[in-house]
Image (cartoon, rainbow, N blue to C red):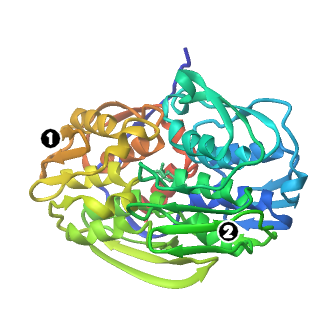
Amino acid sequence: MDILSQKVLAYGNKPLTGQMSVPGDKSISHRAVMFGSLAKGETNITNFLAGEDCLSTIAAFQAMGVQIDRNEHTVSIKSNGISGLTEPSQPIDLGNSGTTARLLMGILAGLPFHFTLFGDASLSKRPMDRIANPLREMGATIDGRDNGRLLPMSVRGGKLSPIDFKPPVKSAQVKSGVLLAGLLTDGVTTVEEVIKTRDHTENMLKAFGANIEVEGTKVTIEGNQPLTGCDIEVPGDISSAAFFLVAAAISEASNITIENVGLNPTRTGIIDVLELMGVTITVEEKRTVGGEPIGDITVKASNVKGAEIEGDIIPRIIDEIPIIALLATQATGQTVIKDAEELRFKETDRIASVVQTLTTLGATITGTKDGMIIEGNTNLHGGVTQSFGDHRIGMMIAVASLLTDEEIELHDPECIAVSHPTFFEDLDSLLDN
Ligand code: S3P
């Protein structure tokens, strides 16, 4: 059994002030490495998220013969394009990364090789049939544990046929995996969603020179288009910023600005939720790179009120719901979150892990089939908690510690490095002013 470390959190009721930036966006960092590896020529990535998940993506393409060099947050890729990729001699370790697993599977399905994929304990429990099934329909041979549903899995890729796919789940990873398989397939592939999920794949494929058409929630891609290497600047990750935005909103006398955050409309649901719940927040959009808007967000401590959060906004806040649940414990009135059954398939079952953790800290919160109900105006207290190996649960617990003078013991804080390796230093920098 692994011996996990622990951290005692005692931030107790201090204001957050000043300016900060957050590491590069996780979704965009993954895609930059993947598309740079598929593109002919040189790709240079700046503000890359050097978190463990994105390092898994780099290692996967290095194993297929792509030259990838990283210096902190800068990555340079030299590739001969799709035809230059080679069959890896070893199984590919996906670590904790669902995005690596689902997008990579789409790419591997279109390559004339055999691959073995495995992940950590958490990833090995997450459903892969959502991506394997459409890829099988396109002609790939994919097998794995639990009747081909779970990692470890094997992929025998090759010549595929295009499909018109309507994903039964709201998932940008599934949409992207099928579009990438479509890119490697003769003919025209379409993916039509019920609700639009994050569209970084569509934006970035255009930056790499692909012809990809977006009409509402329908995306059309023509196969066998060459990608050409380019420079990608990764915006700050709004999903990492969310923890600090909420921290400032609920800590008396706080006032912070987070600079150079990605403001892609498919990701800014957290801003809408903060506004809906009465938080004083201003957004200054400054520029757009590779189809991705970037700007500064300022938040002040505010009186927060409960809200009903459901429907089309859910995919736009899917990674922010743990921290929104914490925010709701400080609101006047009740908050109800619905239509978020996808939370059950994240790094942990995030309905169960949020409810258990916030209950331990004194919240009144009930899990439902597709969300949670949170009572407001609760005084949180200290306690013994664990991240369950889920970075976003770990960061939620750290922010909860701002609300109590009692100590919170956090077991397994290391997983926070998945998306925000400098999280604790960044939090300290706002508390020191
Ligand atoms: C991601 C999509 C989302 C999100 C994940 C990253 C992506 O997952 O939760 O953190 O980069 O496409 P789903 O698309 O499975 O909902």
Residue at 54%, 52% (x, y): give it: 173
Residue at 48%, 42% (x, y): give it: 391
Residue at 39%, 58% (x, y): give it: 315
Q: Residues within 10 Å of mark 1 (few under 14, many from 20)?
A: some
Compared across the picture, whether 255 is left or right of 336 comes to right
- Is any part of residue 15 visible from this angle? no
The image shows residue 370 at horizontal and vertical percentages of 26, 44
Kindly identify which numbered label has been placed on residue 108: none
From the image, tell me which residue sits under label 1: 364
The image shows residue 388 at horizontal and vertical percentages of 43, 31
Q: Earlier in the sequence, mark 2 or mark 1?
A: 2
From the image, tell me which residue sits under label 2: 205
Q: Is residue 378 above or below residue 209?
A: above
Q: Is mark 1 within 8 Å of ligand 1?
A: no
Q: Is mark 2 within 8 Å of ligand 1?
A: no
- Is any part of residue 410 visible from this angle? yes
Q: Residues within 10 Å of mark 2 (few under 14, many from 20)?
A: many
The image shows residue 197 at horizontal and vertical percentages of 45, 61
Residue at 16%, 58% (x, y): give it: 331
Circle 1 — which element?
loop
Foreground label between 2 and 1: 2
- Indicate the amino acid at tag 1: Thr
Q: Is residue 241 above or below residue 342?
A: below
The quarter of the image holding the N terminus is: top right
- Indicate the amino acid at tag 2: Leu
Separation (CA) of disc 2 from disc 1: 44 Å
Of 236 and 131, which appears nearest the observer?
A: 131
